[in-house]
Amino acid sequence: AADLWTCNVQESNNADRLAGVPYVDSKSKDHFVDDLASLEVSRSGGLGMELLELAGGRDDGIGITIVSGVTEGGNAEKAGILPGDSIARVTVYERDETTTTTSPGSSSFSGLVEETKSRTRDCEARDFDGTIDALANFPGENAATVYLDVKRIRRWPKVAVTVEYPASQCAEGFDPVQELELFAGENLQRALLNRGIVLDDPGNRRCDFCGSNACYVSVSRGKSLLNPMGKTEEKLMERNPNVRLSCKATVGYNMQEGDLRLKVNLSQH
């Protein structure tokens, strides 16, 4: 995964991150960066991982550092960390005990109050020195365990889609059956249009959601690869359980792979 990592900077604020904050990303559209939160790693005997700096040398400490190896049977391996991962955040939890005296009602008492506090150090898109500092120095000598947020590059699952046009809409020599490859998580209607599938069904009624008269598709194989119908769509399709609203369908539900076969422009078949 080393050759797939890159570093980007968000230009404007969004729900995920602030503008100007660097983050690691994938160079390849066939891969994405997955988030693994709070992997518990014991520090007893060492973390059991080796780091490799892919990019660095800047004055601001921005760079890319990944895990190049984990010790077999070591703490990092036991926590599920893999070579190629990038450490994004280190969290340490500490117990703080204080003696308190209170007067609830007419009775006074004193005792110990235990409170758990956390400290966090972000190290996403940092160079080797910044990552090492977060892992080795930031937790302090007394921290027996660290909790690591990890970035991992994964391959986008793909769904092979066979699309069948009505023969009446096809010119002579045009194959009515088209083979496509879609990424899991794509909206079906948008994905079909982006791949050049012509959705045009003047004989059908318009979809109440997107307004298209060609929103309806008939699924003959791989129905489970689409997200479950919502209540409204389910009610609309009571008599046609194999028909879906493409504007409401997500391909590769739960990151599944497989084969999907469907017909478009249904009233023209």
Image (cartoon, grey):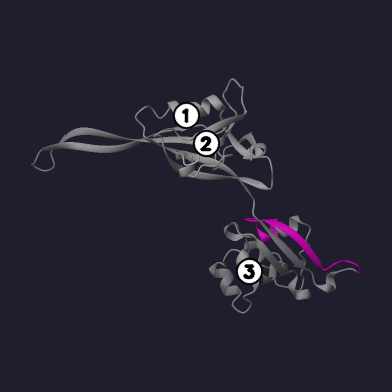
Where is residue 175 drawn, in percent x and y? 85, 67
Structural crowding at the residue carrying mark 3, measured as other residues with C-alpha within 10 Å and reported as few (<14), some (14–19) or many (≥20):
some
Q: Is residue 70 magenta?
A: no
In the foreground, 33 or 71: 71
The residue shown at (70%, 69%) is 217
Regarding mark 3 in the picture, which secondary structure is present there? helix
Identify the amino acid type marked 3.
Answer: Lys
Q: Any mark on residue 134, and which?
A: 1
Residue 91 % position (x, y): 42, 36
User: Which of pointers 1 and 3 lies earlier in the amino acid sequence?
Assistant: 1
- Looking at the rendering, the stretch of residues picked out in magenta corresponds to 172-190
Q: How many marks?
A: 3
Do tag 3 and tag 2 residues touch (Cβ < 8 Å)? Answer: no
Image position of 133 (left or right of 92): right
**Quarter placement of the N terminus:** top right
82 and 195: which is toward the camera: 82
